[in-house]
Each structure stands twice: as C-alpha cells, then as structure tokens.
Amino acid sequence: METFDTNGVVRILVEDDPQQSFAALSRWRQALEAGGAFLPRLVLVEAVWVLRISYGFNRQAIHGVLDALLRTEGVVVEDQPSVLAALASYATGSADFSDYLILESARAARALPVHTFDQRFARHADVSLIVTEASP
C-alpha cells in the first residue's frame, strides 16, 4: 500500500495541470494495482479546503468527487466510517469539513458534546456553543 498527499490527490481530482495530473493518475493506478492507496484524514481535510478555496467547488461537488474517490476499490481511508459520515454532513451542513470530522471523532470516542465558539458548527445537535459572559 502507498500513501498519497494532498497535492497528488488534488491533481487527480481537478486535472488542472496536464503533466502533473497524468503523472499522479498513473502513480495512483499503479498503487491500486500493487496493493492499494492510503489516504490519511489530514490529506482529506486539506483537499476539501483546496477544492473549496482554490478551485471554487461547492459542497455538493466536493462531496461528489471525494465520495467517489473514497469508495474506489483499493482505496483505504484512515478512519473511513468517520470520514464518510463527516463528508455526508459537510454536503448538507453549514460548518467546515474539519468541524464535522472533529464531531465524528468525538462521537467515536463517546465524548459528546463538542464545545465551540463557531456558531455555524453549534447548529448541530451534538455541538454546544460556548457562551461568553460580559466581564464585570
């Protein structure tokens, strides 16, 4: 099994640089044939950010391309159940993908709720908004 980092995954998904995209996709196919491709959670967090900020993908587009990639035969994802749940929440939610991944990690650890100052994230039932009180 071989690991791919964010820039390799992004080249595969967006094909914006023909030479790098071809090389990344060739290496990807070789890895799948040789035993698999491993994707760490952090690579996926970074990939979502790059797709959203640098390429302007919306939530549904990000969900579509990553869901297809993660379900490819031979792809192994670090903590795949949590990643897929976070990706599904991200597609329809208002918080960042990283927030939903934190939530799924907390759920797996039975450590809910998640406390945050992020009002968008706190809309989720298992997330608690930290409320500040005025200083005396």
Image (cartoon, rainbow, N blue to C red):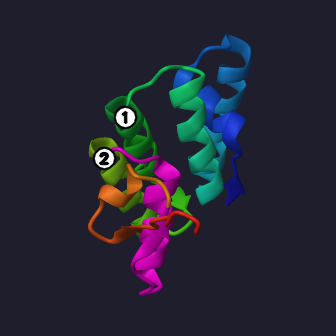
Proximity of marks 1 and 2: CB atoms separated by less than 8 Å = yes
The N terminus appears in which quarter of the rendering? bottom right
Residue hosting label 2 = 93
With 77 as the anchor, is 128 left or right in this view? left
Residue kind at label 2, given as amino acid type: Gly
Q: Is residue 74 visible?
A: no
Q: Is residue 72 magenta?
A: no
- Is residue 1 positioned above or below 27 on the image? below
Callout 1: SS? helix
Looking at the rendered structure, the number of numbered marks drawn on it comes to 2
- Residue 86: percent from the left, percent from the top? 40, 57
Question: Of 38 and 35, which appears nearest the observer?
Answer: 38
With 105 as the anchor, is 58 left or right in this view? left
- Taking the view exactly as shown, the residue that stands out farthest to the bottom is 110
- Residue 72: percent from the left, percent from the top? 43, 48
Report the Cα–Cα distance between label 1 and label 2.
9 Å
Residue kind at label 1, given as amino acid type: Arg
Residue 67: image quadrant is: top left
| Residue at x-position 64% and y-position 49% | 43
| Residue at x-position 46% and y-position 67% | 130
**Which of the two labelled residues, at mark 1 and mark 2, occupies the earlier sequence position?**
1
- Residue 38: percent from the left, percent from the top? 62, 57
Callout 2: SS? loop
| Residue at x-position 58% and y-position 19% | 15
Residue hosting label 1 = 59
- Tell me the magenta residue range: 93-116
Q: Is residue 102 magenta?
A: yes
Badge 2: few (under 14), some or many (20 or more) residues near its Cα, within 10 Å? Answer: some
Question: Of 39 and 96, which appears nearest the observer?
Answer: 96
- Is residue 70 positioned above or below 27 on the image? below
